[in-house]
Image (cartoon, grey):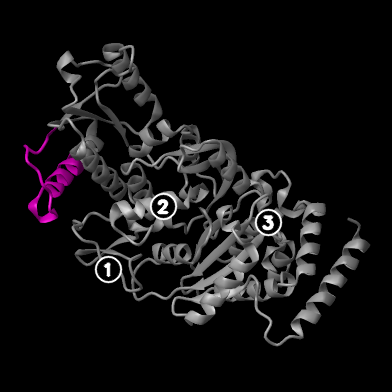
Amino acid sequence: MTSSSRKSSWKSVESALAKRLANARWPSRFGHLMTLDDDDDRDDDHRRRHADRRGDDKREMISVLMPVRDAMPHLPSAVMSVLTQRGVTLELVVADDGSSDGSSEWLRELERAFERSHGDDDDIRRKRRKMDESECGTRAKKERTKESWDAAFAEASDPSVVASVASASCEFVFVRVARANTPSGQGLALNACYARSRGAYVGEMEADDVRPANAFATLKRALEENPSWDASTSRIDLIGVDRRGMKRFQEWQNEQTTPREMRDGRFIEIPAMRASGLYRRSALERLMALEGSSRVYRDLWKIGDVVVDCAASDAGEPSPRSAEYQWWPVDSDFWHRWFFHRFVVGKVPEKLYVWRQYDAQSTKTHSRCSLEQLRRCKAHFFVREILRERPVVRAVRVYGVGSTLDAWSRAIEDELAHQTSHDTGADITYAVPSVTATNHVPGCAPWTAEDASPSVAHVFVFGMSKPRRKVAAAIERTFKTKSSPFGDFRAFFVA
């Protein structure tokens, strides 16, 4: 499309909009500002208009949830990278958690810009789709190196630009949430977004990251081609501050691609960025049903001597049966609950999520993201796993070296004591498994045939990939059978 023809096309669009706006009661098609205490009639009207317009499209719709709290200056780029997705019907549901840096004001401006450029008029929508097809989302669809991502979205700071390049098949919903003096609003905002969403598929987006324009179409296609998957994720790329540790984490995570690799790797690190994924809504609904909960996300923090779920309400609610040390990041909590309930996730080979690194990042500053709390989380779900196994696990043998071996042994012992106590309502009719710690040199095979027993869980504490490979090779040499490389030897790798 030439520059002159594009201007002519937009003049006709603006003319149609002007006529539409002449009606004082003209409703907003996309930018509906909602709060948790919105008037019910207004909310019902919003949903009814969507249902009338889209019919059964929600069966194919992707709902992208974006929690926001003081996300400037990166918020516009994140929003733009979602609203310029191609090949999908998508709604972006953004929940602002009391921002004070201009994020909320920018989102309101975007709401108004959407009203001007994406109205209900059928003629306007046809013209927008035609322009989408002709321009093919060139502003966001070009192949980019990681160094050029910021340049790709340089115009995103202007809400009217974001609205003008947004795909005709993308919608925008703005939700405001209010919370009391709790330390986190991430889970509360995510749950509010989920409650407002309508799609059969649910994705996420952090407010300071970006993704290419084919991301959700690729993830959706992966779910269609793999009906046994409950979710699809992608490999990730990094931009921003360059840190060797995060680069190593990225490389390890990108290597975990099959459902088996991702499940087995969960006690080493989270096997995928949660926000890189696309989830079947039916799976998330089953997750809530299995846990007897009405919320997808938990947001655990320690306030005083009590662990509080900040996602449960605006003031937070005490987490029942939680010990005072059982609080950890939303990401870790979600993935461990996911795998504990036997949900399946795979990973596509493309890098479809770009994770921004900077000094003030919560993963580097929040106390619940410390190595100790991450270890506590893994130990908690590991113990839950072995306590439900049949035949019953009667012994846990922990292998490693130094302080890391000692820390893991203590964490497992603490969890066994807590989860088998009467205070948690546990119904334990057998002896609590014993825990022994053993200094171990990777590559050695000090085991006998008796160690290949379903009643013994062997836990190997090695943070680096090379020692883990040596351990796996030694187990395979000793216990390999035709049906399994480890035979009946029950090995868990943790870090």
From this view, report whether residue 310 is shown above or below residue 46: above
Question: Which numbered disc flags the more N-terminal residue, 3 or 1?
Answer: 3
Query: Residue 178, can we see it?
Result: yes
Badge 2: residue crowd in 10 Å (few <14, some 14–19, many ≥20): many
How far is disc 3 from disc 1 in space, using C-alphas?
38 Å
Task: Assign a secondary structure to mark 3.
Answer: loop
- Of circles 2 and 3, the one toward us is 2
Rendered image: mark on residue 284: 2
Task: Assign a secondary structure to mark 1.
Answer: strand
For the magenta stretch, what is the residue range? 409-435
From this view, report whether residue 387 is shown above or below residue 326: above
Rendered image: mark on residue 84: 3
Res. 114 image quadrant: bottom right
Badge 3: residue crowd in 10 Å (few <14, some 14–19, many ≥20): many
Q: Position of residue 366 (x, y in %)?
A: 37, 58
The C terminus lies in which quarter of the figure?
top left
Task: Assign a secondary structure to mark 2.
Answer: helix
Q: Pointer 1: what residue?
A: 317
Residue at 48% of width from left, 82% of height from top?
Answer: 39
The N terminus lies in which quarter of the figure?
bottom right
Q: Is residue 417 magenta?
A: yes
Residue at 73% of width from left, 75% of height from top?
Answer: 116
